[in-house]
Image (cartoon, rainbow, N blue to C red):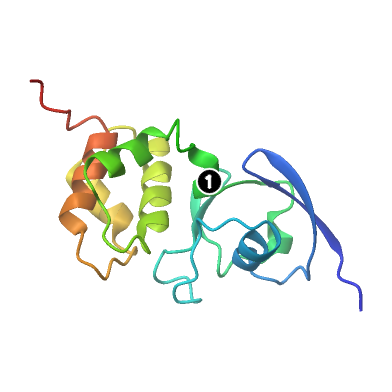
Amino acid sequence: MTQPTIRLTVNGRIHDVSAAPDTALLYVLRNDLELNGPKFGCGLGECGACTVLIDGVAARSCVIPVGGCVQREIVTLEGLGSRDHPDPVQDAFIAEQAAQCGYCLNGMIMTTKALLMRTPHPSETEVLEALRYNLCRCGAHVEIMRAVMRAAGHLVEAQD
């Protein structure tokens, strides 16, 4: 049976993909569009490794059916910035060395981006609340918090 063609807007580009409407968005992003930012973690929407932005809101792509993403703007980690011009959130995570293995990093950065889009200067309590469902097994929580606070403009580089 032939799969229907689904038109998605991902990272500002339109893509036509053949997929069943109930296919998890994560599989289309990784397998069809070859985007490796979103990671498969738990497959249940509980760990945050697969987080993307859908219309500016952080969403777990492992539990979102691709059919529900038509006419919506999807942004993955690859769509935030580039190696030469990282997004300010990516820049802050780099500056604070806020990763060990990097598996949770996609979810942490995408959730942070969504938070800062709606609350540009969050308190530590607001940051903790936003990230509470993103799991980091390596224990880089202190560095992640510093990165988010840096991206929010609460921390600045020390001047020489």
Is residue 92 found left or right of 6 in the rendered image?
left
Number of labelled discs?
1
Residue drawn where x is 31% and y is 64% of the image: 101
**Mark 1 closeness class: few <14, some 14–19, many ≥20 residues within 10 Å:** some
- Answer left or right for 60 relative to 86: right
Rendered position, 43 above or below 10: below
Q: Amino acid at mark 1?
A: Glu
Query: Looking at the image, which is closer to me, 130 or 1?
Result: 1
Q: Quadrant of residue 108?
A: bottom left
* Residue found 27% across the figure and 34% down from its top: 152
Q: Quadrant of the C terminus?
A: top left
In the image, farthest residue toward the right: 1
Q: Which residue is mark 1?
A: 78
**SS class, disc 1:** helix
Residue found at the very far left of the displayed protein: 160
- Relative to residue 33, is residue 159 depicted above or below? above
Q: Where's residue 12, x and y in %? A: 66, 38
Q: Is residue 24 above or below residue 93?
A: below
Which residue appears farthest toward the front when viewing the image?
84
**In the displayed structure, does residue 69 sit left or right of residue 142?**
right
> In the rendered image, which quarter contains the N terminus?
bottom right
Q: Residue at the spot x=63%, y=59% of the render?
A: 29
**Rendered location of residue 104, percent (x, y):** 36, 62
Which residue shows up at 48% across the image and 65% down it? 39
Q: Nearer the viewer, residue 133 or 141?
A: 141
Q: Position of residue 94 (x, y in %)?
A: 29, 42
At which x and y percent is residue 5? 85, 60
